[in-house]
Amino acid sequence: MGRLPRLYVKCGLKECISHNIASVDCVVLEKNIEIWLKKGETLPEFIGKNANFLRREVYDRFHEYVDRTTSKMRTDAILVLPDGRTRIYLREGDELIILPVEGFSKTLIADVGNRVRKGDAFAAVTTRSGNIHYLSPPKNGVVIFIDEISNRPHYLYYLLPEDV
């Protein structure tokens, strides 16, 4: 994987803005208005108290915002893919598909931001006996995170399913 996506997660006003100045990179959402602020930029005066604020977070912490028992998002989030133009909006309660990749040898085929279709391989696993198994998702979706579990070397793919 090359450059990492940027992750923004929902927070309170005070975690993002101090004295009308952005204390961190953040996104302000109010009705149909979306404002991207870099640290040190001034919050526009027309933004009301009912706006939603999302602060920039370390992308590798994405898994902390997903409830692994229900596979649902714990909070609102925005992923900005490395191309800088593609954005994936996640809402609290959105259900994700979490797919494990375990085996003797693992080859990741799909990367973050890739669309995978039901029946297409997103990873390959080689067994100790040399058999290769291609893993495919149960539904069409977009890869939004790949978690590497180091204490037991394997990966978890997080997919946002597409509405069918």
Image: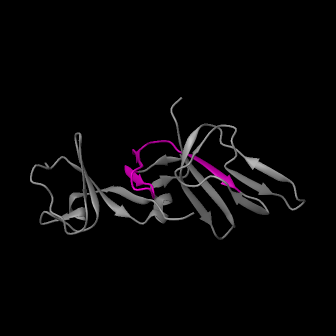
Where is residue 113 drawn, in percent x and y?
52, 51
Where is residue 62 drawn, in percent x and y?
47, 59
Asked if the stretch drawn in magenta spans residue 77, the answer is yes
Query: Would you say 163 lies left or right of 41 here?
Result: right
Residue that lies at the very extreme toward the right in this rendered image: 129
Instruction: Name the image quarter holding residue 22.
Output: bottom left
Instruction: Name the image quarter holding residue 116.
Output: top right
| Rendered image coloring scheme | one colour
Q: Of residues 9 and 83, which is closer to you in this image?
A: 83
Residue plotted at (48% across, 53% down): 66
Q: Of residues 162 and 156, which is closer to you in this image?
A: 162
* Quadrant holding the N terminus: bottom right
Placement of 123 over or under 148, stated as above or below: above
* Quadrant holding the C terminus: top right
Placement of 131 over or under 24, stated as above or below: above
Q: Of residues 62 and 46, which is closer to you in this image?
A: 46
Residue segment shown in magenta: 75-101
Where is residue 149 drawn, in percent x and y?
62, 65
Number of marks in picture: 0
Where is residue 7 drawn, in percent x and y?
40, 59
Residue plotted at (77% across, 56% down): 125
Query: Would you say 111 lies left or right of 84 here?
Result: right
Asked if the stretch drawn in magenta spans residue 17, the answer is no
Residue that lies at the very extreme toward the left in this rendered image: 45
